[in-house]
């Protein structure tokens, strides 16, 4: 519950300053939940990140399993009918996600993982936004490495089928799993670096070299990029996790990196929720989140679902 609500909170705090530069946020940092800004939305509004997260979770709640066709159908309902949104409006949907879902819509009899885009330019963070439920599922089911990888590949490939996207999702899932199993953030990161990634090409492994071959925590903020490129996003999220010491510090640190603030805030919030617990989330942030009870109902059902 702490992780998933942390995701939604980080997402909502980042929404008003999406695309803002780091320099402008340094002059006027965001330190609380605000409204309007980039998308002219009320405070507490979450974006496509949380919509796709709960579309995925709703599928698992319904099927008690990972059913990629059902997940894709839910994502399509979000895109077409604004299901799973805070205000019946879809905004900030990524081009890769949009194109893949449109291709699937025209071929609903096919497996949706056939329509994920595969070009290097398609490696934005769209599938990373919705991948964390697989970590909870894998821990509960005690899945083997090969099973985890196959699920990550299938779920990412609904929209993002390039191996750099798949590898990024796999790194995040494994990190979350180590945290869920009680490891502290430094041990979890160290263990994530030791995971076998040899099934990915040298090109993909090299893309993540600063994360898995070096020590991202040794970099300073000017070395961290916060774009929507999945490698940049993942580096930023893990860097902030390692550098911060509380839920609030993690969210504020993530969002004030600038650029893709809603996604970096969300993914960081999910990790911070695990590390610091539900009680660490500021009450005034919780109270301002739009459709809070709706989110809590879906998250609670997921937390009680043992996927039997």
Image: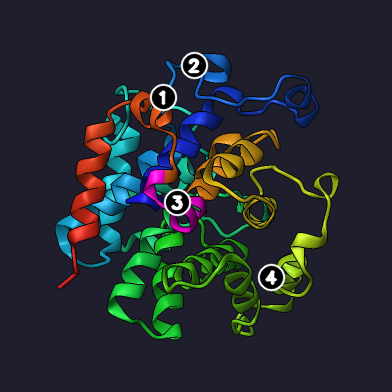
Task: List x then y, in percent, for residue 4.
Answer: 37, 49
Task: List x then y, in percent, for residue 168.
Answer: 59, 63
**Residue 272 falls left or right of residue 308:** right
First of labels 1, 3 by sequence position:
1
**Callout 4: helix, strand or loop?**
helix
Task: List x then y, in percent, for residue 185.
Answer: 58, 65
Q: Is residue 3 above or below residue 289?
A: below
First of labels 2, 1 by sequence position:
2
The answer to whether residue 107 is seen in the rendering is no
The stretch of residues the image draws in magenta is 270-279
Please give the residue where the numbered disc 2 appears in the rendered image: 35
Q: Nearer the viewer, mark 1 or mark 4?
A: 1
Mark 1 and mark 4: Cα distance apart in space: 36 Å
Q: Is residue 98 above or below residue 153?
A: above
Please give the residue where the numbered disc 1 appears in the rendered image: 44
Mark 4 and mark 3: Cα distance apart in space: 29 Å
**Callout 2: helix, strand or loop?**
loop
Q: Are marks 2 and 1 in contact (CB under 8 Å)?
A: yes
């Amino acid at each position: 519950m702490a992780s998933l609500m942390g995701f939604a909170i980080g997402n909502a705090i980042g929404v008003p300053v999406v695309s803002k530069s780091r320099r402008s946020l340094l002059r006027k940092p965001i330190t609380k939940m605000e409204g309007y800004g980039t998308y002219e939305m009320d405070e507490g509004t979450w974006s496509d990140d949380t919509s796709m997260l709960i579309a995925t979770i709703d599928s698992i709640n319904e099927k008690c399993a990972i059913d990629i066709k059902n997940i894709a159908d839910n994502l399509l309902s979000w895109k077409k009918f604004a299901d799973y949104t805070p205000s019946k409006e879809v905004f900030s949907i990524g081009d890769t996600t949009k194109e893949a879902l449109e291709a699937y819509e025209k071929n609903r009899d096919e497996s949706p993982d056939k329509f994920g885009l595969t070009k290097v330019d398609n490696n934005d963070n769209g599938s990373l936004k919705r991948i964390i439920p697989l970590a909870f599922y894998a821990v509960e089911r005690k899945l083997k490495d090969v099973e985890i990888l196959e699920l990550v590949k299938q779920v990412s490939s609904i929209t993002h089928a390039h191996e750099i996207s798949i590898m990024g999702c796999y790194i995040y899932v494994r990190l979350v799993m180590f945290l869920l199993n009680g490891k502290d953030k430094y041990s979890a990161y160290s263990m994530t670096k030791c995971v076998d990634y040899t099934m990915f090409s040298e090109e993909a492994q090299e893309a993540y070299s600063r994360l898995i071959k070096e020590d991202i925590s040794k970099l300073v903020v000017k070395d961290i990029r916060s774009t929507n490129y999945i490698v940049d996003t993942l580096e930023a999220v893990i860097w902030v996790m390692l550098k911060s010491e509380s839920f609030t510090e993690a969210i504020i640190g993530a969002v004030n990196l600038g650029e893709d603030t809603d996604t970096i805030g969300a993914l960081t919030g999910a990790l911070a929720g695990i590390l610091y617990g539900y009680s660490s989330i500021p009450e005034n942030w919780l109270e301002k989140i739009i459709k809070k009870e709706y989110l809590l109902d879906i998250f609670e059902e997921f937390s009680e679902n043992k996927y039997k």
